[in-house]
Image (tube, rainbow, N blue to C red):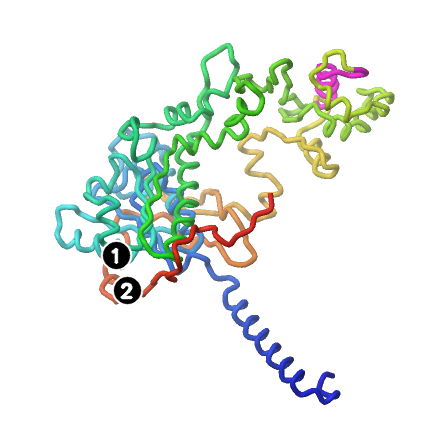
Amino acid sequence: PIGKYGDQPVLDTAVKVCSDLASIQSLANELRGGQVLEPYTVLDFTDERGEIGPMILGDLGAEVIKVELPGGASSRRAAPFQGAKEQPGSRATGDLSSLQFVAYNRNKRSIVINPADDDDRATLEELIRRADILFESAPRGILDELAIDFNKASALNPNIVHVRLSPFGSTGPHAAFHGNDLVIAAMGGPVALQGPIDRAPVRISVPQVWRHAGIEAASGALVALTRTRRTGGAQFVDLSAQSVMTWTMLNAMDAHAIQGFNFERGGSTINNGQLKMELVYPTSDGWIVALPTSAVLAGCLEWMIADGVADAAYREVDWQNYDLNIRELDNKPINLYQAQELLAAFLCLHTKQELFEFGLSNGVTLAPINTLDELLSLDHIQTRDYWHDLTVTDNQGTDKVINTPGLWAKPSAYNLSIRHSAPTLGQHNDEIRSELSKPAKSKEPVGDEDVLPFAGLKVTD
């Protein structure tokens, strides 16, 4: 249509634009379905303290090599185990009977390095030269036994990203302290918020410290990698699990600065300094979390009236005024404690699923407290095809299929993938050594000026 007007320059431009768009589309089709970290190599020297971090990068396509000593990583002997419970140390060092090891070491290959063997030391150094990111658990981790620190790693590889996970950071008065899950959660702060105030604090249920720390380590590694790719130069990511756990307290971190006092343990209630707001209520088949605020009360009001729990006069309540004056016990026509009684009388008439589905349909936050069985059968997770079937072998040599967490995101621009399950000890020794005999691929930094990793990004808050 442009050509019929005889405007050849316009026509030529249009043809050029179409050609460019075709090239872009071809490139997009090529990239779509690829893996964002496919060009990068990660060395994993972690144990049970942080193995999820390198695994996350493996899911994103990175080549993750788990470097182990001849006895295998201590996480291979970490409970819980498949099969009958056995005495500590009775497990073979290289088997896959530790369910924890199986859970956090997919998409990794294993190589064994003997510190006393000269050839192995040369192999280790070549691995570091070729790697992009190195993760270690510290103190008293594998790299300590291999006598490798950031200075030695960066001398071998001037563009290495060295990520060090430890209980309390690399420096400071607690740097050399042991820190298990309970100690770090307590010193990080979350334990101070859990349980009733008239008894001792309670620990977090399932061990979570090193899961949080591992994920933060993966994030820190990618930020540092961005910096290195732009400007060159080795980067050291010093990650304190204690600091990570402080972040999990959310608004309790800065409560004092905002409201003049810290939050205290209150069981399942929120203590605002004057009143206690109940969060957890019984249903006909379990428990549910609901805030006794206007969003929930007004959102469920018609159902409450239909149930005969609430009077029709409540339709005339100024619910915005109720929220603004929620601390006032003489608030008319309903105060906080009366609202909680109303909510409790309503919620106990219905099942968690009924309430949950109503909330989803009507924009009301009603959050069931699910059992593990209920979580495993949750429709949303099933529909999203989240669970991953994994074949494992118990200590009697019997194969069985178990349900495990699958991919944690499904982006449209690129793929995440589970390419292989956790490796046996030294499973890829020959394979990795053979690859090291070939020339390394060049991955020189862009060479920009010294800019921060997020320079040029805009954020809407």
Quadrant occupied by the N terminus: bottom right
**In the image, is residue 33 above or below residue 408?**
below
Q: Residues within 10 Å of mark 1 (few under 14, many from 20)?
A: some
State the image coordinates of residue 414 (x, y, percent, origin top left). Answer: 51, 58
Quick check: 198 left or right of 214?
A: right
Give me the disc on residue 440: 2
Q: Of 426 and 367, which appears nearest the observer? A: 367
Q: Are marks 2 and 1 in contact (CB under 8 Å)?
A: yes
Q: Of 206 and 395, which appears nearest the observer? A: 206
Chain-order first, disc 2 or disc 1 = 1
Q: Which residue is mark 1?
A: 129
Identify residue type, mark 2.
Answer: Ala
Residue at screen point 20% across, 55% down: 123
**In the image, is residue 135 above or below residue 130?**
above
Which element type, helix, strand or loop, lies under badge 2?
loop
State the image coordinates of residue 428 (x, y, percent, origin top left). Answer: 28, 55
